[in-house]
């Protein structure tokens, strides 16, 4: 990692928002944080980059940006993961425009969950403008481990948590940033997730909502991550015992795997879409251990037939939604109103169900076989049905 | 007898191979290497069909098993070296010379073997050059081809991925060469005959179906705002300005972005029916929204695309389909259309120098050319006019103070200034020059010559090289759009300002485009699944592209 710092003289900004970020830390991309700077006619910028030796290029790109925009009394901090100058210019401008706009940008009617980042997903699902973030990026509580491995950090460590209302009901919500380290859980990230659960317990909110999108635990901080997962499961169990509904949404790019796959099954309910995937071991891991003949992870159609959203819905492990934000929100509202109960009997019933599933499917080689046993007609056509036809079939 | 030696030799060779055949069919497929040892003579010119998308895999594996004592010093003449076996024949001493076009995926191995002296690189061609030479001095003695289906008599169906198979078969069959074909399916009646049985000497049943690679599928989910900005600039600043209706697109994300902006951005500019009506292009899935919205009238395809067969069948108005309803592609004719009939070529590259020369060769690998040098070249042999061609020609003639005698094909490079962090696209000297010295080539492997390039589009803006008076101006125009690369940082601001004033350089704001307008919301499809839905379920993407 290389740290670069520049001061530029610039007219005082007329910006209305501080503490906000643009971009994400993943390959070929970067994150910029906007903060206040103590000198009115000076712009200060710090760059932390994975690609050393480009100080002159950074200076030129930032210089051109400062020449066009009034950013005096602003401080930008960049966490860069090999963004090209084109992307750097774009993010600088995006951050400025975001900070300069008055509108809250709360219309997500035509948005797609898949296209939104972790924060936008929260804003799209909760009542307009009522999300209050806890430990936002501006707190800069980053992973203590990644820096030691010479890896870039993200200011929110890939987990966005906070308080909100859904249809007027107070809920606490957590959203995983799939783009930073695949949404994987580390020490800080995990502490945020279990911390918001404990706060929900203490404040007796209506529900705890998880927007899951993660491959599991970060290899780079594996022990801390594994501990974080177990702490998170313990916190979820406490919420369940207190009859506070814990609802998950799995509708993002990475789905829910590894420790987060386990977490997804500990919740009272999860909502899935067609593109969702959830399981414990990821397809590549299964292929590595069992061989390609057992499971070909490059056969993505097979992957979705064995752990995709439709398969999970057919098995009764999840509630199915179309990809429309409005539909996901509607399903979420229904689940918030559903009473939950968590006791020994429920758990034993669940075990029995799973045992029966194993017995019923001992000869199944594919999701299609499982669906046929579940009594669905034309099982091979299920992946290609429209959402509405599939939901009709589920009834 | 003097002038029919080859005829006699072919008769004798096939007579010797009869013991392994039943009619034209190889009886026992384990005897394939023996069959080759009977038929292929040392020093023969052999085409081991490797097209862009389909390859005679089974025959290639068989050829690797022959005894190099019996079959050796072969001269390989084929367009693509794409299978490991295509290189293995050299490693095993079965083949020693090569004339080819393109070595996708095997580029590094081919170069190493050439450096070790195991491959004598005769010539690197464009597709059309190699096909032309099949009919002159590089006619295959033996062609090892692949077809989707055959009937018992040996007529062949090659279908959507016909590509160059008929051209190879024709050159070989009509010059007393021997044509051997692998087929996966033997049927009583073919959907249609793509290659008649009389051109075919030997057929082999391949137990495994042909794997065709989806080379022309670009996932809309991977198109970022930078590509979208470039596509907006190109549509407004080039497609609309010159009214381009006959064109070819390369296969990068930038051109995919253009395709996905046609029904949204281009339509909002009132360009439907004014641009992009006739395209030389494989049936790329990203074309689906533009086809559905009625933008495109005709598509001439050099090859097919995996998963697009049913869609193409249902859009016979657009594509070239047979009496059976399925597509027939033709690489040679599509390349000719790309050479003579289009008014614009748009493609990408890995490196561009100050003259505008571009190359995809790097120090590590030399992939060859394929079709781009033909598609992306202005052609002095053209005599028919079009408004687009004349407009580009007039710009150039006026800049050069010349009388207008001919138009110009628009040759557009769409590239980001950096390929990845730290790797500039714009360079003072191409790696191709180093490679030329290293490989002792007569010429540097340049993909498209700067002389032919008319426009360069980057995220910074558009350089219109037609409006540059001389090489010094051209250099400054290129530097102006090279952004923060060392080449770009070394620009002369005064010269650049002058060129900008003249319109030789246009920035987004000159075209009324704001960077903040370049969002993914403009894409007519944001995912492969969207493409499936827009196609009415007719597009059936390969499993590797699914997320459902």
Image: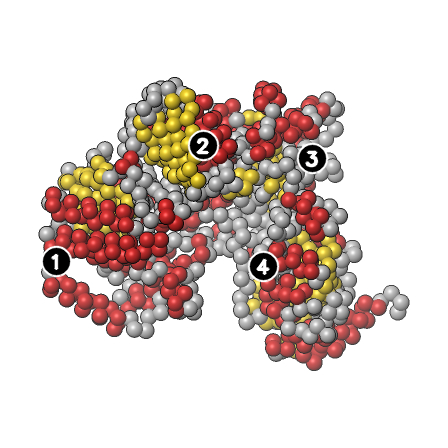
Residue at 35% x, 26% y: name it: A74
Kindly report the distance in space between the C-alpha atoms of the residues bearing marks 1 and 4: 58 Å
Residue receiving disc 2: A89
Residue A275, position as x, y percentages in the image: 34, 52
* x, y percent for residue A284: 40, 61
**Which class describes the residues within 10 Å of circle 1: few (<14), some (14-19), or many (20+)?**
some
Callouts 2 and 4 in the same chain: no
Report crowding for label 3: few under 14, some 14 to 19, many 20 or more residues within 10 A (C-alpha): some
Q: How crowded is mark 2: few (under 14 residues within 10 Å), some or many (20 or more)?
A: some
Instruction: Tell which circle, 2 or 1, labels the residue nearer the N-terminal end.
Output: 2
Residue indicated by mark 3: B451
Residues at badges 1 and 3 in contact (C-beta under 8 Å)?
no
Tell me the subunit letter for badge 3.
B
Taking the spot 26% from the left edge, 50% from the top edge, the residue there is A190
Task: Give the residue at the far bottom of this rendering.
Answer: B19
Q: Which residue lies furthest to the front in this view?
A: A148
Give the class, few, some or many, for how many residues have Cα within 10 Å of label 4's Cα (few <14, many ≥20): many
Residue for point 67% across, 48% down: B435
**Element at label 2:** helix
State the SS at label 1: loop
* Residue holding disc 4: B54
Give the Cα distance between marks 2 and 1.
52 Å
Element marked by disc 4: loop
Residue B279 appears anywhere in the view: no
As measured in the structure, the alpha-carbon distance from the residue carrying label 2 to the one carrying label 4 is: 42 Å
Q: Where is residue B502 in the image (x, y as percent from the top left)?
A: 61, 20
Whole-angstrom CA distance, mark 2 to mark 3, is: 31 Å
Question: Which one is in front, B235 or A385?
Answer: B235
Q: Which residue is drawn at 48% across and 51% down?
A: B311
Which residue position holds label 1? A342
Badge 3 marks a residue whose secondary structure is helix
């Amino acid at each position: 990692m290389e740290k670069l710092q520049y001061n530029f003289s610039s007219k005082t900004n007329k910006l209305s928002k501080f503490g906000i970020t643009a971009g994400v830390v993943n390959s070929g991309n970067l994150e910029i944080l906007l903060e206040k700077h103590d000198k009115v006619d000076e712009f200060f910028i710090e760059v932390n980059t994975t690609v050393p030796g480009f100080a002159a290029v950074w200076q030129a790109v930032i210089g051109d940006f400062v020449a066009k925009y009034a950013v005096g009394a602003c401080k930008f901090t960049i966490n860069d993961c090999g963004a090209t100058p084109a992307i750097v210019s774009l993010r600088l401008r995006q951050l400025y425009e975001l900070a300069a706009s008055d509108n809250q940008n709360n219309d997500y009617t035509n948005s797609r969950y898949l296209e939104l980042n972790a924060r936008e997903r929260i804003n799209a699902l909760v009542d307009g403008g009522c999300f209050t973030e806890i430990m936002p990026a501006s707190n800069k509580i980053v992973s203590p481990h990644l820096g030691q491995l010479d890896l870039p950090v993200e200011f929110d460590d890939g987990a966005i948590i906070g308080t909100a209302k859904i249809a007027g009901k107070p809920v606490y919500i957590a959203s995983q940033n799939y783009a930073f380290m695949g949404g994987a859980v580390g020490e800080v990230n995990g502490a945020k997730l279990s911390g918001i659960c404990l706060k929900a317990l203490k404040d007796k909110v209506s529900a705890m909502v998880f927007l899951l999108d993660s491959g599991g635990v970060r290899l780079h901080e594996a022990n801390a991550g594994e501990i974080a997962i177990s702490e998170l499961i313990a916190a979820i169990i406490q919420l369940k015992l207190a009859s506070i509904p814990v609802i998950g949404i799995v509708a993002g790019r990475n789905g829910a795997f590894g420790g987060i796959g386990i977490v997804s099954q500990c919740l009272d309910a999860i909502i899935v879409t067609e593109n969702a995937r959830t399981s414990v071991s990821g397809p590549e891991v299964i292929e590595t251990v069992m061989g390609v003949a057992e499971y070909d992870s490059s056969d993505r159609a097979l992957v979705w037939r064995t752990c995709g959203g439709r398969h999970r819905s057919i098995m009764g492990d999840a509630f199915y939604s179309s990809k429309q934000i409005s539909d996901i929100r509607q399903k979420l509202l229904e689940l918030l109103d559903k009473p939950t109960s968590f006791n020994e009997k429920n758990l034993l019933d669940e075990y029995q169900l799973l045992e029966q599933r194993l017995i019923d499917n001992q000869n199944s080689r594919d999701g299609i076989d499982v669906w046929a046993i579940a009594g669905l007609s034309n099982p091979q056509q299920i992946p290609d049905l429209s959402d509405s036809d599939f939901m009709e079939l589920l009834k | 007898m003097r002038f029919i030696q080859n005829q006699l030799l072919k008769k004798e060779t096939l007579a010797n191979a009869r013991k392994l055949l039943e009619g034209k069919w190889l009886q026992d497929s384990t005897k394939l290497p023996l069959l080759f040892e009977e038929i292929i003579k040392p020093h023969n010119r052999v085409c081991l069909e490797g097209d862009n998308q389909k390859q005679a895999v089974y025959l290639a594996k068989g050829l690797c098993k022959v005894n190099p004592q019996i079959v050796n010093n072969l001269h390989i003449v084929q367009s693509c070296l794409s299978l490991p076996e295509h290189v293995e024949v050299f490693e095993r001493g079965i083949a020693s010379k090569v004339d080819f076009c393109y070595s996708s995926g095997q580029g590094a191995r081919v170069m190493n073997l050439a450096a070790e002296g195991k491959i004598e690189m005769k010539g690197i061609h464009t597709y059309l050059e190699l096909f032309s030479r099949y009919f002159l001095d590089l006619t295959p003695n033996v062609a090892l081809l692949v077809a989707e289906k055959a009937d018992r008599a040996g007529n062949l169906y090659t279908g959507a991925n016909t590509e160059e198979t008929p051209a190879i078969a024709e050159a070989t069959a009509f010059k007393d060469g021997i044509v051997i074909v692998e087929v996966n399916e033997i049927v009583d009646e073919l959907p249609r005959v793509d290659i008649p049985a009389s051109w075919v000497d030997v057929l082999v049943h391949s137990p495994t179906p042909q794997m065709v690679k989806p080379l022309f599928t670009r996932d809309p989910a991977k198109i970022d705002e930078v590509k979208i900005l470039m596509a907006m600039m190109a549509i407004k600043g080039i497609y609309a300005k010159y009214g381009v209706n006959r064109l070819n697109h390369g296969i990068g994300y930038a051109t995919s972005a253009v395709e996905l902006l046609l029904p949204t951005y281009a339509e909002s500019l009132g360009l439907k029916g004014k641009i992009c009506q006739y395209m030389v292009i494989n049936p790329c899935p990203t074309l689906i929204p533009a086809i559905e919205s009625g933008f495109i009238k005709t598509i001439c395809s050099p090859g097919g695309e995996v998963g697009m067969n049913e869609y193409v069948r249902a859009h016979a108005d657009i594509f070239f389909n047979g009496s059976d309803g399925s597509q027939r592609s033709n690489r040679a004719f599509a390349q000719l259309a790309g050479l003579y009939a289009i008014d614009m070529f748009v493609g990408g590259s890995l490196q561009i120098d100050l003259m505008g020369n571009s190359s995809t060769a790097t120090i590590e690998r030399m992939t060859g050319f394929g079709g781009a040098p033909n598609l992306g070249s202005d052609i002095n042999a053209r005599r028919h006019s079009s408004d687009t061609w004349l407009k580009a020609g007039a710009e150039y003639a006026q800049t050069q103070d010349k009388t207008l005698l001919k138009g110009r094909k628009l040759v557009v490079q769409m590239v980001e200034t950096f390929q990845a962090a730290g790797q500039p696209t714009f360079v003072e000297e191409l790696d191709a020059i180093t490679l030329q010295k290293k490989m002792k080539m007569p010429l540097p492997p340049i993909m498209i010559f700067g002389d032919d390039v008319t426009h360069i589009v980057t995220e910074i803006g558009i350089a219109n090289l037609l409006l540059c008076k001389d090489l010094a101006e051209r250099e400054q125009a290129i530097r102006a759009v090279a952004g923060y690369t060392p080449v770009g940082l070394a620009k002369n601001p005064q010269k650049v300002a002058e060129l900008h004033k003249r319109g030789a350089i246009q920035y987004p704001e000159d075209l009324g485009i704001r960077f903040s307008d370049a969002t993914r919301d403009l894409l007519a499809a944001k995912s492969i699944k969207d493409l499936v839905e827009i196609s009415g379920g007719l597009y059936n993407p390969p499993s590797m592209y699914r997320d459902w």
